[in-house]
Amino acid sequence: MRELLLGPKRFTDLRAGLPAASQNVLSQRLRELEASGVLRRRRLPPPAASQVYELTDLGHDLEPVVQALARWGARLPLISTNPLSPDALMHALKSTFHPETAGDFEGAVELRLGDQHFLATVSAGHLIVTRPPETAGAQATLHTDTETLRAVVFMGEPCDNLRIEGDRQLAERFVRLFSRPPRNS
């Protein structure tokens, strides 16, 4: 579910985001979710012409549940250093965003994580993360990988580890709008 909330994905993209799931287990889960009406398969038009999985309206209705689980997990001490998928990191950002910290912050930041990109928009104390076809309107772009962005946002590492285009001040403020998980002692 988490891997499909921000948009459709091919089977290979789902496998990359869920490395602990075997191909057989993932295939079975996808069949079950399709049979229950939570997701559907469709073929992209040429030139892509590949099959993708996408959530139905029923599947999208589960987003508050996924976010509630993410918020609950964010309160636990950070004990795992397992890599996060880009989508998992986007949900971590959404679940740890603090409107109080944001205050009057308004802005749009493009997050380029390898070949995946997202647009994070903060407005009126709300964070919206999308995977748009293009990211026009971003005031800053962060070029990095998932683990580096995770370390900057949640471990307090310096922004010097990111390649920033555009409004650097806005980008540096953006990465500090999220709560950090407690450290395991």
Image: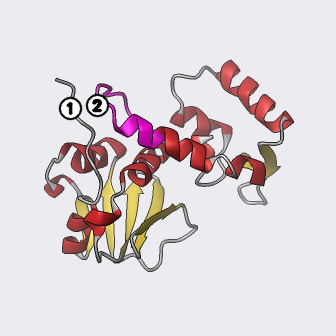
SS class, disc 1: loop
Residue 2 found in image quarter: top right
Residue 45 found in image quarter: bottom right
- Residue identified by numbered label 2: 78
The image position of residue 89, as x and y in percent, is 41, 45
The image position of residue 184, as x and y in percent, is 21, 26
The image position of residue 139, as x and y in percent, is 34, 77
* Residue drawn at x 30%, y 45% as measured from the top left: 150
Circle 2: is it few (<14), some (14-19), or many (20+) Cα within 10 Å?
some
What mark, if any, has residue 11 been given in the picture?
Answer: none
- Side of 130 relative to 49 (left or right): left
Q: Can residue 85 be seen in this view?
A: no
Q: Give whichever of 31, 67 is nearer the camera.
A: 67
* Residue drawn at x 20%, y 42% as measured from the top left: 155
The image position of residue 185, as x and y in percent, is 16, 23
* Residue drawn at x 50%, y 38% as measured from the top left: 69
Tag 2 or tag 1, which sits nearer the N-term? 2
Q: Is label 1 in contact with label 2 (beta carbons under 8 Å)?
A: yes
What mark, if any, has residue 183 been given in the picture?
Answer: 1
Name which residue type carries label 2: Leu
- Side of 150 relative to 45 (left or right): left
Part of the protein shown in magenta: 70-83
- Side of 94 relative to 171 (left or right): right
Above or below for 117 versus 4: below
- Side of 126 relative to 131 (left or right): left
Name which residue type carries label 1: Arg
Q: In which quarter of the image is the N terminus?
A: top right
Above or below for 163 versus 108: above
Name the colouring of the figure. secondary structure
The reply to whether the magenta stretch includes residue 5 is no
The reply to whether the magenta stretch includes residue 81 is yes
SS class, disc 2: loop
